[in-house]
Amino acid sequence: MRSVRSQSYDSKAKTKNKSKKMRNQILIATAALTTVAVAFKVTERMIGNYFYRLAIAREDSPHRKNLDPAVSTDKISLKMQERINERKAVKEHFLKQCPPTDVFMHAFDGLKLHAYRFVPHPDKHRWIVLLHGYMDEASYMFYYASVFADHNFNALVPDLRGAGQSEGDYIGMGWNDRLDVVGWVNQIKKWDSQARIVILGVSMGGATAMMTAGEELPDHVACIVEDCGYTSVADEFAYELRNLFRLPSFPVLRFADRVTRSRAGYGIFAASAVEQLKKAKVPILFIHGEKDTFVPTSMVHRVYEAAAGEKELLLVKNATHAASSLAEPDLYFSTIFRFLEKHMSIGK
């Protein structure tokens, strides 16, 4: 018979072997999990950085043109092309008659921002701040400046951060830009203490205008006009991922959000026009094309419902993205100026 000591030794040996086996299993599992975690982090970084370069970084991307194209001349009617040509001529004449001056300011985060200032009516106190869209710059809005000049407005047309002559290595998508617009409004106040100011934006500029509406604005701001802006940056990118790239928003936007927070200083999910509009106190006119497939028309109903103050809505039949003023120019501008007359007495 085996001694008690021998049995005890065998038991301890078995226990030791089990412990060693368990330790090895734990080490293997830990190594496997670590490998998976590292691979996940690498994948997350790669996807996040790719999306950032595609959609947010100032650098050019071969695919970015698909995200928010301008009116395509090979898909529009002859009538629309004639209107585009007429606008170019009007803009050229306006620039000759009223050349702008370059003005600059430093943003809250130190970026040097640029804008064009048009003062065709130095004895008037009506001002329009015109905000351009994604991948555009201030010059895109010069035609609007000429139209408003005909209605006795002076104009400030900024290059949003990351565009034109403004500094910034990323596109703000309206979020950081909203604070820049407040800064430009304060600049106008310094130039003209009696200023009555309207903010008008198209596409990303429209989203910027709505996001600005949620900030504490001086009484000088009479009202806001937004044309085809999106509900939020997350909503717009999720829509574009599905519509253009057939990709799911999760987890792509989560990865992109982390990179954007790190490199651009704002979060994709924080940048919401809907949430800002809940705090808005100024009257807002919402405009959207019924055939918009880049910022879907459904979004305008959500932002309209969210707006807390006085509001109006204009839906333009047969208008695609950012083309309402081309599709129905008389309706478009007459609606805007009726709205302004109501809220700032532009005829007086």
Image (spheres, rainbow, N blue to C red):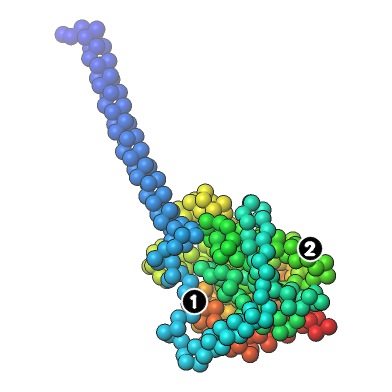
Residue at mark 1? 70
Q: Position of residue 198 (x, y in %)?
A: 72, 73
Residue at mark 2? 190
Q: Is residue 326 above or below residue 18?
A: below
Q: For the point 22% across and 14% down, which residue is it?
A: 10
The image quarter in which residue 285 lies: bottom right
Q: Position of residue 80 (x, y in %)?
A: 51, 89
Is residue 236 shown left or right of residue 3?
A: right
**Circle 1: is it few (<14), some (14-19), or many (20+) Cα within 10 Å?**
some
Q: Nearer the viewer, residue 208 or 255?
A: 208
Q: Say which element carries label 1.
A: loop
Q: Quadrant of the C terminus?
A: bottom right
Q: For the point 64% across and 51% down, which residue is it?
A: 110
Farthest bottom residue?
Answer: 79
N-terminal of the pair, mark 1 or mark 2, is: 1
**Circle 2: is it few (<14), some (14-19), or many (20+) Cα within 10 Å?**
few
Q: Label 1 amino acid?
A: Ala
